[in-house]
Image (cartoon, helix red, strand yellow):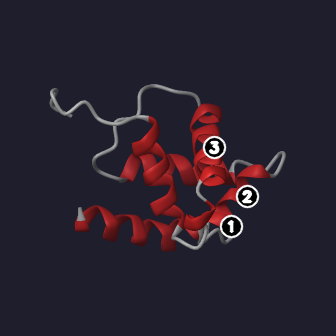
Amino acid sequence: MMKRVLLAMTLSTSCAMLSAQAETVQELLEVCQWPNNGGACFGYLAGVDEAADGLCVPSVTRAALRQVFLNWAERNPQKWGDPAAIGVWLSIKEAWPCDTSKPQ
């Protein structure tokens, strides 16, 4: 778990530069709410999804992944100060929990 948290924190720092300086959940939420955000939101979400261990995302559209994050962030304003990558990771884990009876 600590490895994942450290990875997410590292991703938060490096990916933030690519995503309109979205360092916190709140900043990424704002970027993802922009119409025509130029792919910054999609790129950030996909980067966390691909780089983080322990995620079990089915084959979904970028729009679905974005909506999962938006819904989670809006339900969890107490997490808005957390690193953006942590928020993405938590939103994905909540939406698509891994089936622990099957190998990942």
Mark 2 burial class by Cα count in 10 Å: few <14, some 14-19, many 20+: many
Residue toward you, 34 or 46: 34
Q: Residues within 10 Å of mark 3 (few under 14, many from 20)?
A: few
Q: Secondary structure at mark 2?
A: helix
| Contact between labelled residues 3 and 1, with CB atoms less than 8 Å apart | no
Q: Between marks 1 and 2, how big is the CA–CA gap? A: 6 Å
- Image coordinates of residue 30 in percent, x first then y, are 75, 60
Q: Are marks 1 and 2 in contact (CB under 8 Å)?
A: yes
Q: CA distance from mark 1 to mark 3?
A: 15 Å
**Nearer the N terminus, badge 1 or badge 3?**
1
Q: Nearer the viewer, mark 2 or mark 3?
A: 3
Please report the residue visible at 40 percent of the width from the left and 64 percent of the height from the top. 8
Q: Which mark is residue 71?
A: 3
Q: Secondary structure at mark 1?
A: helix
| Residue depicted at x 62% and y 50% | 75
Quarter assignment of residue 23: bottom right
Q: Position of residue 7 (x, y in %)?
A: 34, 66
Q: Position of residue 100 (x, y in %)?
A: 19, 33
The residue indicated by pointer 2 is 31
Numbered marks: total: 3
- In the picture, measured across the screen, residue 92 lies left or right of residue 21, that is left
Disc 1 target residue: 27
> Residue reaching furthest right?
35
Q: CA distance from mark 2 to mark 3?
A: 14 Å
Q: Position of residue 73 (x, y in %)?
A: 61, 54
Residue 101 placement, left or right of 79: left
Of 60 and 72, the residue lying toward us: 72
Give the quarter of the figure containing the N terminus: bottom left
Sequence-wise first label, 2 or 3: 2
Q: Amino acid at mark 3?
A: Asn
Q: Amino acid at mark 1?
A: Glu
Mark 1 Cα-neighbour bin, 10 Å: few <14, some 14–19, many ≥20: some
